[in-house]
Image (spheres, coloured by chain):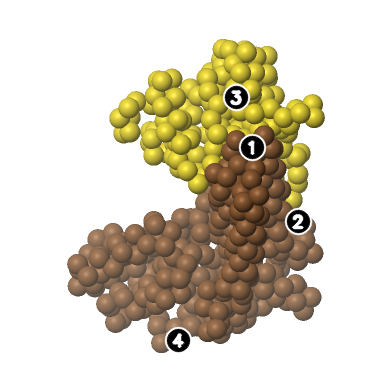
Chain colours: A yellow, B brown
Amino acid sequence: MYILLVEDEDPKRRHIATFISEIAPTAVLQVARSVRSALDRFEDGVPDVVLLDMSLPTFDVGGNEGGGRPQGFGGLELMRNMELEGIECPVVVITGYDAFTKLGGQMNLDALNAQLSEAHPKIFKALFHYNSAYGDWQEKVRSILIDLGVISENPAG
Amino acid sequence: LSDDHKSEIQEQLSGFSERFDALLLKIKDTRFQIRSVENPEGIFDLPLNGRMLLIVRDIMQTGLSFDDFLRMTYLLFWGTLEPSLAEARRIISEELKSEISDLFDDLKLDVRELAEHDPAFPMASANITDASVDVQRSIDAASAWFVKPEGQQAVHNFTLNQSLEIAVASALKSHRAFKPEIDLKVSGNVNLQAPDLLLVTDAIFIALDNVKTHCGIKRDVKVSIRCDVDERENVLRLLVGNSVSPSTRNGTSEGKLEQIRAHIAAGNIGKRARKEGGSGFLKLAAALRHSPGGELQFGFLSDHEFQLSVKLKPTEFTVAVIQAR
């Protein structure tokens, strides 16, 4: 199994990667930190699932360089690009935000979930809220990965 | 929100500020200090000891001019300081960043408990997340403060032969009464910069120190040193093998080696490296931790032979090269 984790925030990425290594110890976990580097990863092969942050920079941040300020909807841009390039693999969004600003207004996670379902019905599978202080997101991610057939109910699988 | 809940949120924010400040102060006051009796957790250490002077003396004997000597002392200074700088960068970008991110997540959770159903909550929570991301970006910038300044990065290179000769000569001078039969073979067309030279001298010093202390043979100790380079992978391989008395290999020595391997595998080498005082392998593992691709293996090959194996990726040459004469 090949899982692509697209996340620019180091602590969140470490938490998710640690959790994935626990529930899918045999899976190959690749990491991308920006929209562009995620697109580059697809050239190596199509993952069995993409775990995607919503707020992402366009390019990787390296050394003292900036990679661009994280875009509120960098994750959305990646999904658009995936569809344009005909990359079909399930996408699970894991965001630390409770709401996003859009056109001066705000969009909560329910509204974003509905929008993603409508705009990307083939690839978008679920959206979860992440907070390191509680483990709700872990159970939800585990459950969706089982539903998608990426992992089995047996943790060793 | 009721006035009571508003007051509680205000208290949550004040508590968060206090915890945030306390975390920064704790790291500053305990870790970002020069290591000393008063500050045992301090990460800045500059071990300019007698052995370092021996290394400098042997480097000088490669025929440097006075200008080259001055340049070299700068490079050795920065090379010696680099493990501290690397540890500072790691603490900032891993430990501090994680702890601060957790503080923000706790704050979001606390505010959620009081105000989840308030229409302003989603944006308040989003603003806290934005602040967390901004702080983490600032932390990345602070981590870059602990990269040695560009002006000091001028490169002086040593051939592999020079590096090994310097390492062996300085190690033997530190153990004057110890005269092993050393068979040294070096192959590979790569030059080393000062930090890598220091790693090689550390490895050879520790290897010979162990041979002297633990091999169990009084005379005619044979030591084989092989150093080559996998040019495709850009990996330097150093093998130090030595004869041992058959009685040296026993349950106690194997147990100690296994214990050291377990500490290294668990990454449990920072403080222990300074306290171990036995093989020096933890110190070497700690130094190699800061070298990309650094790898350390050791153990008995048979009842008569022990081997230490070190791999490291030599620093890439990116600045003007001044060949050692």
C-alpha separation, residue under disc 2 versus residue under disc 4: 38 Å
Q: Quadrant of the N terminus of chain B?
A: top right
Residue to which mark 4 is pinned: B176
| Observer-nearest of B94 and B304 | B94
- Above/below status of B272 relative to A91: below
Task: Of the two numbered discs 4 and 1 on the same chain, state the one appearing first in sequence.
Answer: 1
Residues at marks 3 and 1 touching, judged by CB atoms closer than 8 Å? no
Which numbered tag is attached to residue A110? Answer: 3
Q: Amino acid at mark 3?
A: Asp
Q: Are marks 1 and 2 on the same chain?
A: yes
Can residue A63 be spotted in the picture?
Answer: no
Checking the image for residue B118, the label placed there is 1
Spatial distance from mark 4 to mark 1, Cα to Cα?
A: 77 Å
Q: x, y (%) of residue A82?
A: 63, 19
Chain identifier of the residue bearing label 3 in the image: A
Mark found first going from the N terminus, 1 or 2: 1
Q: Is residue B10 left or right of residue B199?
A: right
**Which chain does the residue under circle 1 lie in?**
B
